[in-house]
Image (cartoon, grey):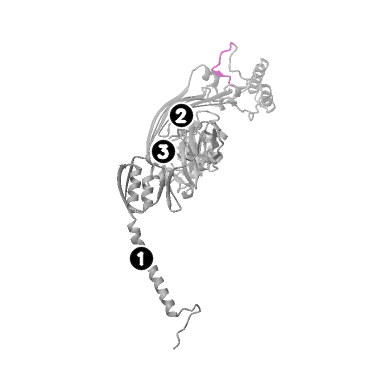
């Protein structure tokens, strides 16, 4: 049998033998490689030796090729390294860690040289509030690299910052709690002025129920949030009157009997009345106190503590951060049956850390009585109207004679110039003014605030007023996740109702009657005309001669201490 030959002239057996030898050589190469690697592993246990000694030890245990400058290596004298069974490259890297030297592999040789210093520039600037330009102490200024914060710093109490960044930095980012982050382009050799805007959306992202802040997306109840800016857009005096503008379900019942009495508190309700209320029960004493007996009044919660309606009525709107109105059962469930009429949660403004700030607010208004609806006749017109109505006619001769005498007496008063405008006597134009002073400052861990306020409201009825003066001190201490807040307030309220009585007493008096005699003294009783009742008193006599008064006052000293522990950073 003939042997088959390959095209190259070699027999098949020869080719098989060559392939077998090549396979054996490859097996031998890969099986001996771990042995060779094992032979070149390095273990170092060196303490406080020079870098040159460490390199010599690596050379002794391996065949690593190194190139370096003696001058650079000899300057490093304190090397401590502990590694076991690592490659020479890893051992060398461990020795150079923490030094100003680095090793790079070039054509199979590790070259040790000095690290190249990264060129840096120094940025300076100031972080401020975009509204009033006040500094934002503690604001963070940083640079982003690969969507991560790298180099950063915090602003000082004056909002100033200083930061070293790589020379190729294009922009920096500033952030502060309650404000929107802002990126600013870097300009060489020019201080940066960064103005941050308040993040108003953050207020709408949560609902404050008096016990905690719940994300609006997780809140299942019905609530309306009104911010401080919204309040001041409508009125700077009374927050209660403003709320009905932003929530149609909160209504204030107009009490025409009390008029513009500054000491009357309005009756209001959320989503209708659950009872007849004070007005139907006792109309003579409506809204003269805190309405504690009114079954329609909602609960007021201020900074976690329940307060009276009068305290809310007298509170300074400039100190409010936001108001949340909780309306349905789901929103007010944590308060139980006491919240059947709704809950109004008031959150006051916390002190802002940083440089000492002094805020002063002054508001004034002029109130004037509107009596345009009282289109009353003067003395001549009233007497003529009575004559045309047959008031002085009678079939009885004696009665007709008395009526004619009465007519002539009234006409005689008119001829004397008596034409009394009774409804103008108890009224006046009132000038109301309100002052509030607030001082705040501190650092992120300890913040403080002090306030003083004075408010005087003069009613359009003579002698009626409501004066309020007070002060308070607020301290906020924060350490890690613990927050301790203490708020002490003192308020003194003095009020007096008008001694001129009710306005209806003046609308029923006659214009041809005089409230003074010929000597200019107030008369106690007015003339009884026709068949009128006897002993008709002069309301101006009671107001001016009897020195009667209806005054009230109260002082309120409150100390609210609260401890909050934030678990968000723990879990």
| Main secondary structure type of the part rendered in magenta | loop
Q: Residues within 10 Å of mark 3 (few under 14, many from 20)?
A: some
The answer to which of 128 and 449 lies nearer the viewer is: 128
Look at mark 2 in the image and give the residue it sits on.
440
Q: What label sits on residue 427 in the rendered view?
A: none
Disc 3/disc 2 C-alpha distance (Å): 21 Å
Contact (Cβ within 8 Å) of mark 1 with mark 2: no
Contact (Cβ within 8 Å) of mark 1 with mark 3: no
Residue 240 percent coordinates (x, y): 51, 35
- Closer to the chain start, of discs 1 and 3, is 1
Q: Would you place residue 176 above or below residue 532 in this image?
A: below
Q: Would you place residue 165 above or below residue 501 in this image?
A: below
Disc 1/disc 2 C-alpha distance (Å): 77 Å
Disc 1/disc 3 C-alpha distance (Å): 76 Å
Please provide the residue range marked out in magenta: 519-530
Any part of residue 447 in sight: yes
Report the quarter where the N terminus lies. bottom left
User: Which callout, 1 or 3, points to the residue nearer the camera?
Assistant: 1
The answer to which of 360 and 106 lies nearer the viewer is: 106
Any part of residue 99 in sight: no
Instruction: Say which element carries label 1.
Output: helix
Q: Residue at x 35, y 58 (%)?
A: 37
Look at mark 3 in the image and give the residue it sits on.
304
- How many numbered marks, from 0 up? 3
Look at mark 1 in the image and give the residue it sits on.
31
């Amino acid at each position: 049998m003939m042997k088959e030959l390959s095209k190259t002239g070699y027999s098949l057996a020869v080719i098989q033998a060559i392939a077998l030898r090549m396979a054996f050589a490859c097996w031998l190469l890969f099986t001996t490689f771990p042995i060779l690697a094992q032979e070149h592993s390095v273990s170092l246990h060196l303490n406080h030796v020079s870098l040159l000694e460490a390199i010599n030890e690596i050379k002794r245990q391996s065949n690593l090729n190194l190139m370096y400058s003696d001058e650079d290596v000899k300057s490093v004298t304190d090397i401590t390294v502990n590694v076991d069974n690592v490659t020479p490259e890893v051992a060398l890297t461990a020795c150079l860690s923490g030094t100003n030297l680095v090793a790079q592999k070039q054509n199979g040789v590790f070259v040790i040289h000095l690290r190249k210093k990264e060129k840096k520039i120094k940025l300076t600037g100031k972080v401020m509030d975009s509204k009033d330009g006040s500094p934002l102490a503690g604001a963070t200024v940083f640079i982003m690299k690969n969507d991560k914060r790298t180099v950063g710093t915090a602003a000082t109490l004056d909002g100033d910052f200083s930061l070293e960044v790589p020379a190729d930095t294009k922009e920096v980012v500033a952030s502060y709690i309650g404000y929107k982050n802002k990126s600013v382009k870097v300009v060489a050799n020019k201080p940066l002025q960064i103005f941050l805007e308040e993040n108003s959306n953050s207020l709408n992202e949560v609902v404050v129920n008096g016990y905690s802040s719940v994300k609006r997306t997780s809140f299942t109840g019905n609530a309306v949030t009104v911010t401080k800016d919204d309040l001041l857009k409508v009125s700077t005096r009374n927050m209660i009157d403003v709320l009905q503008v932003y929530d149609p379900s909160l209504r204030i019942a107009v009490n025409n009997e009390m008029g513009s009495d500054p000491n009357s508190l309005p009756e209001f309700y959320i989503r209708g009345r659950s009872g007849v209320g004070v007005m139907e029960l006792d109309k003579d004493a409506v809204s003269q106190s805190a309405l504690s007996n009114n079954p329609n009044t909602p609960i007021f919660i201020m900074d976690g503590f329940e307060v009276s309606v009068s305290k809310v009525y007298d509170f300074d709107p400039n100190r409010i951060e936001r108001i949340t109105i909780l309306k349905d059962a789901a929103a007010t469930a944590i308060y139980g049956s006491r919240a059947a009429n709704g809950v109004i949660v008031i959150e006051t403004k916390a002190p802002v850390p940083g440089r000492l700030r002094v805020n002063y607010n002054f508001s004034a208004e002029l109130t004037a009585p509107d009596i345009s609806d009282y289109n009353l006749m003067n003395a001549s017109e009233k007497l003529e109207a009575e004559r045309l109505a047959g008031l002085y006619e009678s079939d009885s001769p004696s009665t007709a004679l008395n009526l004619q005498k009465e007519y002539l007496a009234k006409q005689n008063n008119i001829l004397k110039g008596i034409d009394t405008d009774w409804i103008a006597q108890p009224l006046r134009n009132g000038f109301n003014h309100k002052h509030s002073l607030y001082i705040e400052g501190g650092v992120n861990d300890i913040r403080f605030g002090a306030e003083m306020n004075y408010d005087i409201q003069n009613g359009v009825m003579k002698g009626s007023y409501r004066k309020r003066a007070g002060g308070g001190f607020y301290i906020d201490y924060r350490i890690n996740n613990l927050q301790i807040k203490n708020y002490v307030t003192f308020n003194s309220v003095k009020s007096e109702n008008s001694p001129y009585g009710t306005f209806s007493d003046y609308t029923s008096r006659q214009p041809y009657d005089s409230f003074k005699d010929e000597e200019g003294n107030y008369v106690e009783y007015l003339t009884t005309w026709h068949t009128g009742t006897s002993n008709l008193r002069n309301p101006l006599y009671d107001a001016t001669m009897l020195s009667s008064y209806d005054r009230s006052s109260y002082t309120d000293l409150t100390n609210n201490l609260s401890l909050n522990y934030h678990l968000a950073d723990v879990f």
